[in-house]
Amino acid sequence: MKQILIKTASIIASLCFLIALLITLVDVICFNRSFFAYEYEKSGQAEIIGMSDEDLMHATHVLLDYLQEKRDDISVEAVIDGVETIVFTTRESMHMEDVRDLYQDALRVRNITALICVITGAFLYGVCGKQRMEVYQDGLENGLFMMGCFVICIGAWAVLDFSEFWMDFHYVFFDNDLFLLDATRSIMINMFPQSFFFDLVVAIIVSFGGSCGLLYYGIRKLIKRR
């Protein structure tokens, strides 16, 4: 019975840690301003929209600051095709409010899973004695297998049909159709075409896979040194 409890706790700790890690990486990558600047330059997005690089990055800073609750709205003006224009529409503002709520919910999930990981990890540390590193490794292996299957399935889906993946993502996490924007009129959707989000998803998956690999390698090395 004790062994079952230990194994279950180790898997819970591992899964909670990996979920917290994944959300943290999403947070870091999604708010990396350099990533946005690189994507804009690569695709020539400022020229496509008809605005300067400076105005494009300023509008981006406004959006990201709003999501991080550093400002109360996404009201911003820019010169587009030679005309001073309000960048984001009311519909886009309403959608970004939903995105901000989703982001804040994700942070709460990260904090809760991190807390559960700490509590279960401390429990295992106290009851496993000298075998605690082996227990941590076993839990990590099981957690990586479960999480890996999930991430691989998501990644394969995104690679095979990103349009369907991205639309279904929105239908799952949003209870309205505010995310359906007209590409011929919406500046926001032209700032972030599907190619941008494809690169974003790939960056998150690669970063998560690399972090998990380094973590597993580190624990294996620690065990061998004992």
Image (cartoon, grey):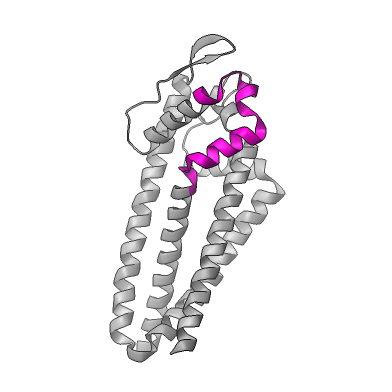
Q: Could you tell me how many numbered marks the image carries?
A: 0
Residue drawn at x 41%, y 29% as measured from the top left: 62
Q: Nearer the viewer, residue 212 or 89?
A: 212
- The magenta segment is 29-55
In the rendered image, the vertical position of residue 138 relative to residue 83, given as above or below:
below
Measured from the top left, where is residue 194 in percent x and y? Answer: 63, 37
Q: Residue at x 50, y 81 (%)?
A: 220
Q: Is residue 216 above or below residue 106?
A: below
Instruction: Report x, y in % for residue 169.
Output: 55, 44
The answer, for residue 85, to whether it is visible in the render is: yes
Residue drawn at x 57%, y 33% as measured from the top left: 192
In the image, farthest residue toward the top = 83
Residue 48 within the magenta-colored segment of the rendering: yes
Q: Residue at x 58, y 51 (%)?
A: 203
Q: x and y percent of residue 56 in the render?
A: 52, 26
Image location (x, y in percent) of residue 208: 53, 59
Which quadrant of the figure contains the C terminus? bottom left
Could one spot residue 170 in this view of the protein? no
Reply above or below: 98 against 225. Answer: above
Vertical placement of residue 93 versus 174, above or below: above
Closer to us: 165 or 62: 62
Whether residue 60 is in magenta: the answer is no
Name the dominant secondary structure of the magenta segment. Answer: helix
Q: Extreme right residue here?
A: 160
Q: Quadrant of the N terminus?
A: bottom left
Q: In the picture, residue 205 is in which quadrant?
A: bottom right
